[in-house]
Amino acid sequence: MISIVTWNMDYWKRNKEQRQAAWTYLTEEIRPDISLLQECVPPPDMTKEYNIIYREIGGTRNWGSAVLTRGYPIKEVEFENSHPGCVVATEVELPDITLTAISVYGMLCKNNYATTTMHRILSDLTPLLHGQRSSRTFIMGGDYNLSPQWDERYKHRDPSHQLVFDRIEDLKLVNCTLQYFGKLVQTNHHARSNYPWQNDYLHASKKLAAKMVSCKVFDVEGIRELSDHDPVISNFF
């Protein structure tokens, strides 16, 4: 059984104690085999138990994205990346397969759109996701800062969020939460909105998605003190 989680850890809005508590929750309560993380800064002592590929966004953001594995060998996959620190692509050596694990953060662009960022990220990843899909098994997860709910709620007044998900589907990746729950599920608790937004996703290759046995959103007591996003975890056999 392999467990894979995605979580936006909300580093920039949290204090030192909350950040440490979030890492403790991840490593002691969730204990995933693979973590796809956004808005994070891995503590130095994490390397004792975890293999880590982390990239900072930089500039005004002294935090970034990461892929962590609990004991499994990992190496970075190089690609033409327009948004360093928003995307981290890796190869994880599992017992039976080499898994290409990608952490994605749909950062708002200077004009305040996440759609533009996500379209560029998908364009950068296309040679990897499309050109090598026959020889690779993929898991891609993160806070995309997008939801098909946006189009319906705001009557398509902004660029379509659904088009991004159409592109992901065209790349033959399966939405794990949608496959498991049959609907969108809330993962984000916005300070200025009570709407049940889903911003966080796991997308898997079809063969991997067929091996999913469970999926869970950690909307549990105390989690909102650590982040305004819920961890999303899927288990595969």
Image (spheres, rainbow, N blue to C red):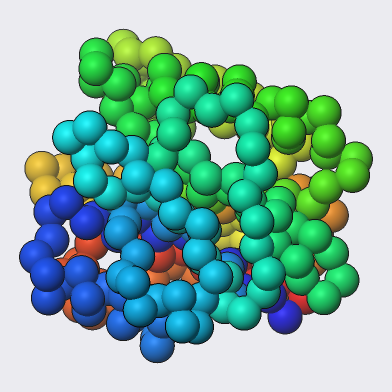
Q: Is residue 166 visible?
A: no
Q: Is residue 98 left or right of residue 225?
A: right
Residue 73 point in image, percent of width and height:
68, 69
10 left or right of 140 in image: left
Nearer to me, 46 or 216: 46
| Residue, far bottom | 28
Tell me the quarter of the image containing the C terminus. bottom right
> Could you say which quadrant of the image residue 91 lies in?
bottom right
Residue at the location (78% across, 29% down)?
130
Say above or below: 113 vs 8.
above
> Against 237, is 68 above or below?
above
| Residue found at x 46% / y 48% | 142
The residue shown at (28%, 49%) is 63
Measured from the top left, where is residue 171 in percent x and y? 73, 31
Q: Which image quadrant for residue 99? A: bottom right
Image coordinates for residue 133, horizontal then vertical, percent: 83, 38
Q: Disc count in the image?
A: 0
Quadrant of the rendered image containing residue 98: bottom right
Residue located 12% across and 75% down the image: 17
Q: Nearer the viewer, residue 171 or 46?
A: 46
Quarter of the figure with the N terminus: bottom right
